[in-house]
């Protein structure tokens, strides 16, 4: 990539983000136009688009599968029933509603893909908000933010945690001991912020009376089969990769979507065309375009190239480097999808540690696991930044985009600034808490 | 680049770079960009060289880097060809009277951190049942300083690098000996990132062109005449620039091969200018002779 192309990439990226932030143009159009300009300047070639789709394929498959399965469950009446139960559990209190929402999403997202969870639970959140006579925008943003943060609870909770953990040879158990507490902190710090961020929801109180009555399910056999599809999907998410033939989460999502379509087609509930028409294609196209832009950004090598600079600036002050990475990757992750950011940051962090002579050059290759204890906080901080930074803005994580898409379909448009009103304060507090965790981690390890 | 490997890459007080590695960079720039001066030299420590290459800070690594299986396989880089065949040797003060490695048993040996030498030194001595005390130091300059200050009985590195240290030693080159044994193979050459086949191909063939030119007596001074004289031979059309299919495929100027020779001369000229008998290093060509003269330098056909 020439210097001119690097400049073009940075300018296009900035213009797209500004256009989305200030609502100058529809966000899908902004992202697509950005990708087209990069293609016209030779920044994005066929190989780059292939690489972007290779990265985006997994998240897009997860979203598509989640949307189709959610659409199937909608026709069973199961959501209405669960929604009524959820509403009953709130007792008509907005405060209980928000706390239950956090408590419901966090454990599910520790094991299942974030955006898929948001899609599956969105009908409950929206219907309960309507019954409580409050806006569902704030709760839907919180749902996305909690789902992203809860991904840090386990090694497999988020592609970013898995990517970092596995590349430094961290096991599921080691992750639980060293990092999970930070994930829990990131979720818990959200709760005290809720009364300030959405006082109207937090302080609301309604008499539920008949509203919380649990509706009957009209087609129990169809509902039972639909629930079997859901159970199969969840089971495969959890154990698919342990089967003799490994089935990764994207493959599981496509299989579940196919089973859902087959069930609706076989039971003559709805034609396939009608279900596919209801898939949120706008969100999927937006994500694909954003992944192309991010591919161009990572191709500039600016992030990876920081490895040598980090060493020049900070030498072997690993705690300082960890905090700098936490903040800077947090900011970057707020405007870039976190998977490519993590992939590029890993190259940068490993390069920095080799240049700092903390590890031999063999550490640059895959499979190196002998990372000295002093280097682990650098990786953990980088992971925190990448995972939590995405909570700040609408385009920071796929769950955020999905959440905004659901709100739009339900009649409430979420703007970039509207999302940031909730997302930014939460992210700042989460990053501060994570920084304290990293410092405490270093202090305890000494 | 390192800026302190005499004969390979040195930057003088005025900021001018010279050496075998530098000349090769100039040849590549002449072939790829049409101008041997279009090179930005980046000074790197040994430990920063692969991070710099992997993270796009540099496009071509020329820092006396040994071609090994693990480097090429694990770091996703490519070593297109060998520019210089070297081996790990030992420099000792003549006054110590040491004539072979066996006499170094139990001695302290200075070695640079993060290099293949650091790994091979204890391995080799262990294999022969000899003791050794490695004194590991951060930079090549630091190792030389420690050795010349008498902190270790010997200095181990690539024999070519030792020749450079010896040439600049305060007591004069004659006060030091390089022991005859070589404990490793150190084929050194350019390194590029993996995944850019055209770039790797161009770098590889610039090197082959330099070798082929020497083999057929083409020099900087007789380039035009020789190219004209041999243009009927398929393998020599690359120098005339008349057949631009290869240049177009690689995305370089049509007369790329001739430009490389014009910029720095053939391999033999580059060698003599930087390492040959007239230089302070005066390193025998040894394995770096042409295959026709008993060496390992061999260019595949250029047709």
Image: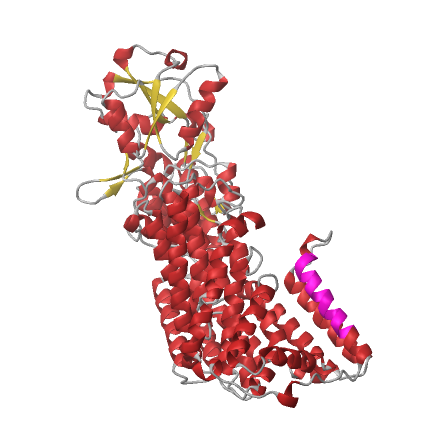
Is B238 on the left-hand or right-hand side of A101? left
The answer, for residue B59, to whether it is visible in the render is no
Specify how the rendered protein is coloured: secondary structure
**Vertical comparison of A104 with A216: above or below:** above
* Residue A395 image point, x, y percent: 46, 73
For the point 48% across and 82% down, the residue is: A201
Would residue A239 appear left or right of B294 to someone viewing this image? right
Query: At 40% across and 75% down in the image, what residue appears?
Result: A17
* Left or right side of A378 for A223: right
Could one spot residue A270 in this view of the protein? yes
Report x, y in % for residue A296. 45, 66
Q: Is residue A59 above or below residue B8?
A: below
Q: How many numbered discs, if any?
A: 0
**Observer-nearest of A69 and A185:** A185
The prevailing secondary structure element of the residues shown in magenta is helix
Q: Quadrant of residue A419?
A: bottom left
Q: Position of residue B60 (x, y in %)?
A: 39, 48
Task: Name the image quarter holding the N terminus of chain B.
Answer: top left
Q: Is residue A125 magenta?
A: no
Quadrant in which residue B98 is drawn: top left
Q: In the rendered image of this protein, does residue B219 appear above or below residue B98?
A: below
Q: Is residue A233 magenta?
A: yes
- Over which residues does the magenta segment extend? A225-240
Q: Nearer the viewer, residue B79 or B143?
A: B143
Residue occupying the far left of the picture? B14
């Amino acid at each position: 990539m020439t210097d001119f192309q690097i400049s073009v990439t940075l300018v296009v990226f900035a213009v797209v983000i500004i256009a989305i932030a200030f609502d100058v143009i529809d966000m899908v159009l902004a992202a697509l136009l950005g990708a087209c300009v990069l293609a016209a300047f030779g920044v994005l070639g066929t190989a780059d688009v292939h690489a972007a789709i290779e990265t985006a394929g997994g998240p897009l498959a997860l979203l598509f599968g989640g949307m189709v399965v959610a659409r199937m469950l909608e026709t069973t009446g199961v959501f209405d029933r669960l929604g009524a139960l959820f509403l009953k559990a709130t007792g008509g209190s907005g405060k209980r509603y928000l706390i239950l929402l956090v408590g419901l999403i966090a454990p599910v997202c520790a094991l299942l893909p974030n955006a898929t969870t948001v899609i599956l639970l969105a009908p409950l959140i929206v219907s309960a908000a309507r019954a409580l006579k409050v806006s569902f925008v704030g709760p839907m943003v919180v749902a996305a933010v909690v789902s992203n943060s809860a991904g840090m609870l386990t090694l497999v909770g988020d592609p970013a945690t898995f990517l970092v953990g596995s590349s430094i040879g961290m096991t599921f158990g080691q992750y639980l001991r060293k990092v999970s507490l930070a994930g829990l902190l990131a979720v818990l710090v959200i709760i005290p912020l809720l009364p300030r961020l959405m006082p109207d929801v937090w302080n609301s109180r309604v008499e539920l009376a008949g509203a919380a009555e649990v509706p009957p399910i009209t087609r129990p056999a169809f509902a039972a089969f639909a629930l079997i599809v859901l159970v199969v999907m969840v089971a495969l998410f959890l154990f698919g990769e342990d089967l003799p033939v490994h089935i990764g989460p994207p493959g599981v999502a496509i299989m579940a979507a196919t089973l859902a379509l087959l069930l609706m087609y076989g039971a003559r509930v709805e034609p396939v065309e009608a279900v596919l028409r209801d898939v949120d294609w706008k969100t999927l196209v937006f994500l694909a375009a954003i992944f192309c832009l991010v591919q161009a950004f990572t191709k500039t090598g600016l992030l990876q190239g920081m490895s040598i600079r980090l060493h020049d600036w900070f030498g072997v002050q690993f705690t300082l480097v960890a905090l700098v990475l936490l903040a800077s990757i947090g900011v970057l992750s707020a405007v870039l999808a976190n998977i490519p950011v993590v992939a590029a940051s890993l190259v940068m962090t490993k390069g920095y540690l080799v240049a700092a002579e903390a590890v031999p050059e063999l550490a640059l290759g895959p499979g190196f696991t002998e990372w000295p204890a002093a280097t682990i906080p650098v990786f953990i901080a980088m992971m925190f930044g990448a995972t939590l930074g995405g909570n700040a803005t609408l385009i920071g994580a796929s769950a955020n985009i999905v959440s905004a898409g659901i709100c739009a379909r339900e009649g409430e448009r979420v703007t970039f600034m509207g999302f940031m009103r909730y997302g930014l304060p939460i992210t700042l507090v989460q990053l501060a808490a994570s920084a304290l965790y990293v410092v405490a981690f270093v202090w305890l390890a000494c | 680049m390192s800026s302190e490997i005499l004969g390979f890459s040195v930057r003088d007080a005025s900021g001018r770079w010279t050496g075998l590695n530098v000349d090769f960079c100039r040849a590549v720039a002449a072939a790829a960009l049409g101008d041997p001066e279009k090179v930005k030299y980046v000074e790197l420590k040994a430990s920063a060289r692969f991070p710099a290459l992997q993270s796009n800070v540099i496009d071509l690594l020329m820092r006396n880097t040994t071609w090994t299986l693990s480097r090429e396989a694990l770091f996703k880089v490519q070593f297109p060809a060998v520019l210089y065949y070297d081996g790990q040797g030992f420099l000792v003060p003549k006054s110590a009277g040491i004539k072979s490695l066996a006499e170094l048993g139990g001695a302290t040996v200075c070695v640079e951190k993060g290099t293949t030498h650091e790994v091979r030194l204890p391995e080799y001595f262990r294999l022969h049942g000899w003791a050794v005390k490695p004194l590991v130091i951060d930079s090549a300059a630091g190792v030389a300083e420690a050795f010349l200050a008498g902190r270790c009985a010997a200095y181990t590195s690539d024999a070519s690098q030792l020749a450079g240290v010896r040439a600049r030693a305060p007591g004069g080159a004659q006060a030091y000996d390089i022991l005859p044994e070589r404990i490793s193979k150190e084929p050194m050459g350019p390194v590029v990132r993996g995944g850019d086949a055209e770039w790797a191909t161009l770098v590889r063939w610039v090197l082959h062109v330099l070798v082929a030119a020497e083999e057929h007596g083409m020099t900087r001074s007789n380039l035009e005449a020789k190219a004209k004289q041999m243009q009927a031979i398929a393998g020599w059309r690359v120098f005339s620039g008349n057949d631009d299919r290869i240049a177009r495929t690689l995305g370089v100027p049509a007369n790329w091969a001739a430009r490389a020779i014009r910029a720095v001369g053939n391999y033999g000229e580059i060698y003599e200018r930087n390492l040959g008998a007239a230089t302070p290093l005066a390193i025998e060509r040894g394995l770096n002779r042409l295959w026709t003269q008993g060496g390992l330098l061999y260019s595949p056909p250029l047709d």
